[in-house]
Amino acid sequence: MSVPRAVGIDFGTTNSVLALSEGLSEPHIVPFGDTATFRSLLCFYTEPNERGHKRVVGVAGPDAIATYELHGGECRLIQSVKNFVADDSFRETTVYGQRFRIEDLVGVILKQLRAGAEKSCGDLGQTVVSGRPVQFAGSEPNEALALKRLTLAYNQAGFSDVRFVEEPLAAADFHLRGLQEDALCLIADLGGGTSDFSLVQLIQSPEGPRRRTIGHAGIGVAGDVFDFRIIQNAVSPKLGKDSFYKSFAKRLPVPGAAYNKFQRWSELSMLRGSQTLRDLKDIRKTAEDAEGVAQLIYIIENELGLQLYRAVGHTKASLSSAEHSDFRFRSGPVEIEGSISRTAFESWIAQDIAAIMAVVDRLFSDTKTELAAVDRVFMTGGTSFVPAVRRAFDQRFQSAEIMTGDEFVSVAGGLALNGRC
């Protein structure tokens, strides 16, 4: 009996990956240029239509980066849109006067992800297996709303048949396919927006290996929060954070809410044209650190989120292999430089790693499983490269084999394998 082509999509906070399984062959990761990942990034701009009126155009992935690099502040850049899918309070956003619901934003990414893949792979059909976090990002995530929105976004991209699989379970299917013995395994999927865990038992039998799921756990703390800590500690203090301004002869602190939004990729892109930006312009007039506040306004108005993301990402990646990294961000009047040590960075993210490990401990407590019973820990996702994160798992699971590799593609590969069922 022939097995049809299966499509798996790992729609991620930072990057997305598409995998295909042709028949019974190993899953194939579809490349986009010279990389296996497709940036989950949106860039909107306007152009005249046939009647001379402006129309809003949205592009994603490599095209979004190219458009942004060409037009800069004339565009509207949106990052980490996945963080909004479970947010009840986020209904829509207005871009150049046109309203976009969250499913419309995600739909643009998925449509262009599909189009890019079909250039080399042909028609992908109507059926897709999509990843989903164990727990969506947000303080009070609405899971049903998130799945509804994602389904509508996939429908916009031409997929009428959508099935969701927890991301760590997909990674488990990818990693466990090569094991030849029974094993109790923890799958740790540490991405950009969420950290998710699945505890599974691999059982060998005459009919072939099978997987029994023991439990899941997740938390909306991952790589984006680590980025937030770098901006919070190394960038925002040079942009007027914790300074003061005068209002009716009173000396008041510059509101921290503006910096909380600035420090999150998903909210930074929403600040342009917001009341928060208008408030900052008023505060600048009497601010003690007027230059710092002015530079913050410049970053927001000129849509410099991508440059800032690159500077932060470079520093974070460098600290995975070096004890110190030089942070540099320059654009127009803004010039922020400084050396950051791995020790300092690890102190900034210590509370976040503790929160992640508390979820792991709760998973074992809820399933009444001993930590020492784990045979293997598979770590996947970009945040698994952070040394302090790997060290935390080494310390928790001293008797287990910690396994890494295929950190960015294992979820998508496992989703494609799931598509065979």
Image: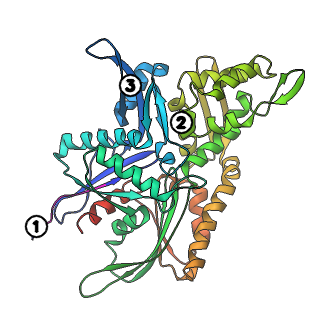
Q: Position of residue 325 (x, y in %)?
A: 61, 40
Q: Position of residue 288 (x, y in %)?
A: 82, 22
Image position of 299 (left or right of 167):
right
Which is closer to the viewer, label 3 or label 2? Answer: 3
**Mark 3 vs mark 2, CA separation in Å:** 16 Å
Q: How crowded is mark 2: few (under 14 residues within 10 Å), some or many (20 or more)?
A: some
Which residue is found at the position 64% from the left and 27% from the top?
Answer: 275
Which residue is found at the position 64% from the left and 41% from the top?
Answer: 230
| Highlighted range, magenta | 3-8
Residue 416's tag is: none
Which is closer to the viewer, label 2 or label 1? Answer: 1
Which residue is found at the position 19% from the left and 63% from the top?
Answer: 25
Q: Name the residue under label 3.
A: 67
Type of the residue with mark 1: Ser
Badge 3 marks a residue whose secondary structure is helix
Residue 309's tag is: 2
Q: Name the outermost residue toward the top.
A: 52
Residue 151 appears anywhere in the view: yes
Type of the residue with mark 2: Tyr
Image position of 43 (left or right of 126):
right
Type of the residue with mark 3: Thr
**Mark 3 vs mark 1, CA separation in Å:** 43 Å
Q: Mark 1 points at which residue?
A: 2
Picture quarter with the N terminus: bottom left
Q: Where is residue 165 in the image (x, y as percent from the top left)?
A: 37, 63
